[in-house]
Amino acid sequence: MSAVLPAGPMAGAVEETTIAPAPDWWQSAVIYEVYPRSFADGDGDGVGDLAGLTARLPYIAALGVDGIWMTPFQPSPQVDQGYDVTDYCGVDPLFGTMEQFESLLAQAHALGLRILLDVVPNHCSSEHPLFRAALAASPGSPERGMFHFVQGRDGQTPPNNWQSVFGGRAWSRANPDSATDLDWYLHLFSAGQPDWNWRNPAVGDYFDGVLRFWFDKGVDGLRIDVAHALFKADGLPDSPSEGGVVDGLRSNPQVSDQEDVHEVYRRWRTIAEKYEPHRLLVGEVNLEPARAARYTRADEMQQAFAFAFVKLGWDPEAWAAVGNELEAARLEHGAAPTWALENHDIVRSVTRFGGGELGGVRARAALVALLGLPGAAYIYQGQELGLPEVEVPVEARVDPMWARGGVCRDGARVPLPWTENAALSHGFSLGEPAAEPWLPQPADWGSHAIELQEQDQDSALNLTKAALELRRQLWKNEVFTADDGGSWRVEAGNLLICKRNEHFLVAVAMGTEPVRLPAGTVLLTAAPLEQDGWLQPNNAAWVLR
Ligand code: BGC
């Protein structure tokens, strides 16, 4: 790793972290995604929790990020690890108490970290009181009107051909044993996650209350789960795609990207702007760039993840094509892309980029590149350690997607290794005795431990910190600005270039031979330069011109 600060104003010390008063703080932000189950276990029951996260907040603050996005910890039967909520305004005892959350929030703010929560508006848990009431009520009742209850075609065949994102059909019978209740209910995910009917205004009112509840508490923003799919096409027509599949990185006229959904985000933005500083809305909008960008128009969300980029392999042409598409979308709609390479749903970048040492080197280069791009960025816990995807033994897998025949996402969710020593689940558990972690840690997990990486100048962890510190200084010195855009190209030798502005570019050597870097001062590289002005394969550089 090498971070060179040029002489002059940028060489100054980094300022103390404090919550910036700027209403548009999110434009330059880097947010760290915490999957609470797997971050730190305060009470030693094998599942990470709020106490564990609170105890480990100084680690996150020391990374130099601006905030934390916490995936769901609200009451839930945990069918989909919390993405099946029974009470949107509570805390599941598995994770702790509301008092513990309030204390976490206060301590995070004191450390200069903002807190974003996950809101899951597409569906709830089948144990949610409103869904229980709907099941108990009769077909056609107002209770059923909160969800999509529809009579099957002939009592046995579901109302349409839609398939669940997790595999299998997207419908289940309301009362399978009843001869008179022939309703089915829609669940784009598991049967334990019934979809809300957003064409019913009562659903919108209910979620307004959820937003206000958390914003009143001082939560800084919300990540919106499956944000593009709340509205389904009127009449719930069959999907023309093969097998009725409804997911995918594309607009799907049956289940996603309906025009009506934008009204929800206009309303939510109005709510978010009633608070000072304005609250942030970041959407999981799994659509191609031109469509996703419509969710970040001036009066909708401030951010939507650049999903087209999230899953790319080591392919410079693909990076440049997606980068330029995102830039075109920014020019049309005004919001810079929100970058991520990893999250709790996808295969770790080390593994995606080839696995082993090669994957590790590439993942570092990709992270350095990402942090130099114009727009906000999200890092998923463990990405800063270069964790690979874990091959979780089949008998230990718990992901409902796997159970329904889809891919298994558990490999990106294995509890973090804090210590080299395996005791207390490599330091994941802070309480004693420590129960087995909810997903098993592999035998070599200790080699990635945070305590080791903190001592190693060349570790992925210290590279991430150096990149974040330099990024902060470049913003402070206005080398980076909110108006920056990305102009992407691939040069001879598969050198990927993203020119951020007249003064700054990111270069990634994605070929097999060393390539000459564009002229300028090299501020940061993912691995040391072996020869001045030349970038070795799988290295990335920030160049000041
Ligand atoms: C979340 C997943 C979850 C799904 C259903 C997603 O996009 O990130 O973890 O399974 O929504 O809520």
Image (tube, helix red, strand yellow):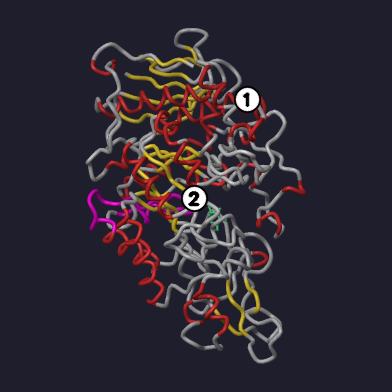
Residue drawn 38% across the image and 71% down it: 206
Amino acid on which disc 2 is placed: Thr
Q: Position of residue 454 (x, y in %)?
A: 51, 21
Please state which of residues 206 and 30 is positioned toward the viewer in this rendering: 206
Please provide percent x and percent y for residue 227. 45, 59
Q: Name the residue type under label 1.
A: Glu
Q: In the figure, residue 110 lies in which quadrant?
A: top left
In the image, the segment drawn in magenta is 272-297
Q: Does the numbered disc 2 mark a residue whose Cβ is under 8 Å from ligand 1? A: yes
429 sits to left or right of 454? right
Closest to the camera, between mark 2 and mark 1, is 1
* Cα separation between marks 2 and 1: 26 Å
The mark nearer the N terminus, 2 or 1, is: 2
Q: Which residue is mark 1?
A: 420
Viewer-side residue, 341 vs 14: 14
Give the quarter the ligand 1 occupies: bottom right
Name the disc covering residue 318, or none: none
Task: Check the image and report above or below for 260 versus 537.
Answer: below
Image marks 2 and 1: residues in contact by CB distance under 8 Å: no
Q: Specify the quadrant of the image occupied by residue 346.
A: top right
Within 10 Å of the Cα at label 2, are there few (<14), some (14-19), or many (20+) other Cα atoms?
many
Query: Outermost residue toward the top?
Result: 531
**According to the image, label 2 marks what residue?**
71
Q: Position of residue 314 (x, y in %)?
A: 58, 32
Vertically, is 231 above or below 5? below
Whether residue 292 can be seen here: no
Which residue, as the protein is rendered here, is positioned at the far front?
A: 432
Q: Residue furthest toward the bottom? A: 180
The residue lying at 60 percent from left, 42 percent from top is 44
Q: Secondary structure at mark 2?
A: loop
